[in-house]
Image (cartoon, rainbow, N blue to C red):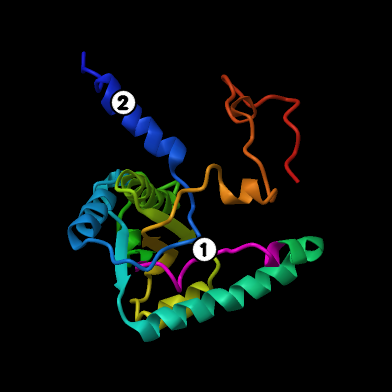
């Protein structure tokens, strides 16, 4: 039987999980290149369906490209606000990204040519996206362990980012990640602090054997 981590190692893993936050406030201090490499390597060691390793990571070091990406995000932020109807003003008060301040900006994408990978994707082709999400989570937890903040920006026009970064046909941007030093980590998720939403009870998300018949529909 495999041995578990010792108590302190196990505690550190769970601490990273529970203290990980989607950060929006950053300091501009540079990230140590060795630390950045560790985080990228952590992402690259994520599990992937059929071992397809579908993640591709574009590090943005050009100021013009960073500005272009932020402009794309801002356009989508306004469009999202308009689509929210009654919650528009509430949404507009939220800080949804830290692209100006963060030390590192990374664009995570699905590779092109994914259709040739059939193992694990024949009936669930979206497992390529699930694999990329695992890579992002690896980086997120490793960043927290390194004392760095990471924020996932998903407010963008996919085609606009694809074109701006010269991605090949078939590739697809999934996330813009803000990475860098922070003054402090939020004590709870920012959207919970801002009363946008709250974490569901675990019991509402874990079933046994089959879906409960009285499960309420989500609005």
Residue 56 percent location from the top left of the image: 30, 63
Q: How many marks?
A: 2
In this figure, which residue is indicated by the disc labeled 1?
154
Dot 2 alpha-carbon crowd within 10 angstroms: few under 14, some 14 to 19, many 20 or more: few
| Horizontal side, residue 206 vs residue 196: left or right | left
Of all residues shown, which one is farthest toward the right?
86
Quarter residue 9 falls in: top left
Of all residues shown, which one is farthest toward the bottom?
64
Instruction: Tell me the tag on residue 10.
Output: 2
Residue 158 percent location from the top left of the image: 49, 72
- Identify the magenta region: 91-105
Residue visible at 33% across and 60% down? 114
Residue visible at 44% across and 62% down? 26
Quarter residue 165 falls in: bottom left
| Principal secondary structure, stretch drawn in magenta | loop
Which of the image's four quarters has the N terminus? top left
Residue 167 percent location from the top left of the image: 35, 76
| Frontmost residue, 207 versus 26 | 26
| Horizontal side, residue 16 vs residue 208: left or right | left
Regarding mark 2 in the picture, which secondary structure is present there?
helix
């Amino acid at each position: 039987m495999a041995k578990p981590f010792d108590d302190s190692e196990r505690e550190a893993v769970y601490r990273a999980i529970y203290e990980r936050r989607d950060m929006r406030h950053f300091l501009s201090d540079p990230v140590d290149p060795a630390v950045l490499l560790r985080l990228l390597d952590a992402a690259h060691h994520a599990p992937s369906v059929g071992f397809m390793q579908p993640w591709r990571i574009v590090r943005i070091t050009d100021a013009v490209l960073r500005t272009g990406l932020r402009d794309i995000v801002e356009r989508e932020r306004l469009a999202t606000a308009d689509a929210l109807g009654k919650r528009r003003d509430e949404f507009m008060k939220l800080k949804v990204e830290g692209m100006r301040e963060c030390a590192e900006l990374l664009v995570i994408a699905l590779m092109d040519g994914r259709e040739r990978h059939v193992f694990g994707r024949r009936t669930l082709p979206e497992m390529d996206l699930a694999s990329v999400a695992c890579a992002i989570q690896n980086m997120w937890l490793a960043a927290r362990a390194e004392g760095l903040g990471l924020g996932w920006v998903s407010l963008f026009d996919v085609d606009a980012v694809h074109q701006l970064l010269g991605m090949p046909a078939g590739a697809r941007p999934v996330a813009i990640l803000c990475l860098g030093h922070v003054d402090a980590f939020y004590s709870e998720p920012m959207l919970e602090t801002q009363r946008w939403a709250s974490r569901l009870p675990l019991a509402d998300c874990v079933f046994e054997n089959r879906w409960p018949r009285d499960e309420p529909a989500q609005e």
